[in-house]
Image (tube, rainbow, N blue to C red):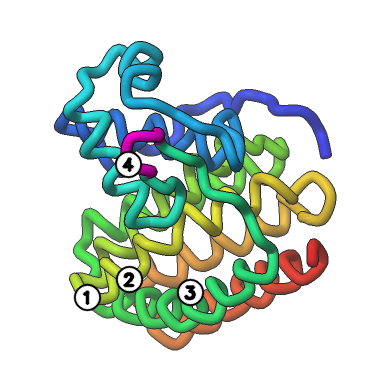
Amino acid sequence: MTKHVAVPRKTPKVQSPDTLTDQAYRQIEERIVTLRLKPGEVLSEQQLSGSLKIGRTPIREALQRLSLEGLVRILPRKGILVSDINPREQLLVLEVRRELERLLSRAGAERATAGERELLNEVARSMDRAGKMSDDIAFMRLDRDLNHLMVETAHNDYAARAMKLLQGLSRRFWYMHYREAADLPLCAKLHAEQARAIAKGDPARAAKASDQLMDYVETFTRATV
C-alpha cells in the first residue's frame, strides 16, 4: 500500500454542512473513523469545543448523533468514551448492511433525480482516481459521500435511518484494518461500479454491484477475525 498522496482534483461535495452541529458531527466522526480519536479514548465536550473552535451546544448535539450510531458512549458525569471495535460484531453489522445496501441501491436506481445521478457519476470518477493513487483519505471521504448519496437517492426515510446507524462503524473498521487485509484499488473500483449502476438507472445491475461490494467487504472482515 502506498502512502497517502493527494488527489489532484477536488472530490465532489455532496453535502455542505449548514449548521454548526453538522460541522461538529462531520469533524468528530472523521476523527473517530480515521482513528485520530482511538477506541477507548475518553473525550470531553470542553476538549472538543476547544479543538474544533465550535461551541459546546453543537458539540453536545453532534455527540448525541454519534452515540446513536454507536461510535461513542456517553457516560453521565464521566465523559464520552470512543467505542471499541469488535470484528465479530462487525460481521453482525454486515448482515444488516448487506440487505439495506441492496435495497437502497435498487431504490436509488429507480428514483434518483438527474442531479443525483450526475453526483453519483462524479463520485465514481473520483473513486477511480483515489483507487489508482491508493489515496486512503480521499477514499474515506468519497465513501462517506457515496453513503450519503445512496440514502438520499432511495427517497426512503425508514431505510435511511437504519443505514445511517451502520455507516460510521463500517468505515472505521475498514480504516483500522485496511493496511493489513484490504485491496484499496479493488475496493474503490467496486464502489465506483455501484455508483455508476445506480446512476444508470438499472435496478438489477445496481443490486448486483451492491452484492459484489458486500461480498468483498465480508471477505475482508473475516480475514481480520
Amino acid marked by disc 4: Pro
**How many angstroms separate mark 4 from mark 3 (CA)?**
30 Å
- Is 61 displayed left or right of 84 in the figure? left
Mark number for residue 162?
A: 2
Pick whichever of labels 4 and 2 is earlier in the sequence. 4
Q: Which of marks 4 and 3 is nearer the N terminus?
A: 4
Residue 107, x across and y down, in percent: 30, 79
Query: Would you identify the image quadrant in which residue 146 lies?
Result: bottom left
Residue 57: image location, x then y, percent: 17, 28
| Numbered disc 1: secondary structure | helix
Q: What stretch is highlighted in magenta?
A: 75-79
The quarter of the picture where the N terminus appears is top right
User: On the picture, is 117 further left or further right than 35?
Assistant: left
User: For the point 27% across and 68% down, which residue is it?
Assistant: 160
Query: Could you say which is closer to the camera, residue 83 or residue 103?
Result: 83
- Residue pointed to by mark 1: 158
Q: How many residues crowd mark 4 within 10 Å: few (<14), some (14–19), many (20+)? A: few
Q: Is residue 40 above or below residue 191?
A: above
The alpha-carbon separation of the residues under discs 1 and 4 comes to 30 Å
Q: Is residue 5 above or below residue 14?
A: above
Q: Which amino acid type corresponds to the residue marked 2 in the rendered image? A: Ala
Q: Name the residue under label 4.
A: 76
Q: Considering the numbered disc 4 on the image, is that residue within a helix, a strand or a loop?
A: loop
Question: Is disc 3 surrounded by few (<14), some (14 to 19) or many (20+) residues within 10 Å?
Answer: many
Question: For residue 134, what is the image quadrant?
Answer: top right
Point 37% across, 82% down: residue: 103
Q: Does the magenta stretch include residue 77?
A: yes
Cβ–Cβ below 8 Å for labels 4 and 2? no
C-alpha gap between disc 3 and disc 1: 14 Å
Q: Name the residue under label 3.
A: 97
Q: Of marks 1 and 4, which one's residue comes earlier in the chain?
A: 4
Task: Quadrant for the C terminus, please.
Answer: bottom right
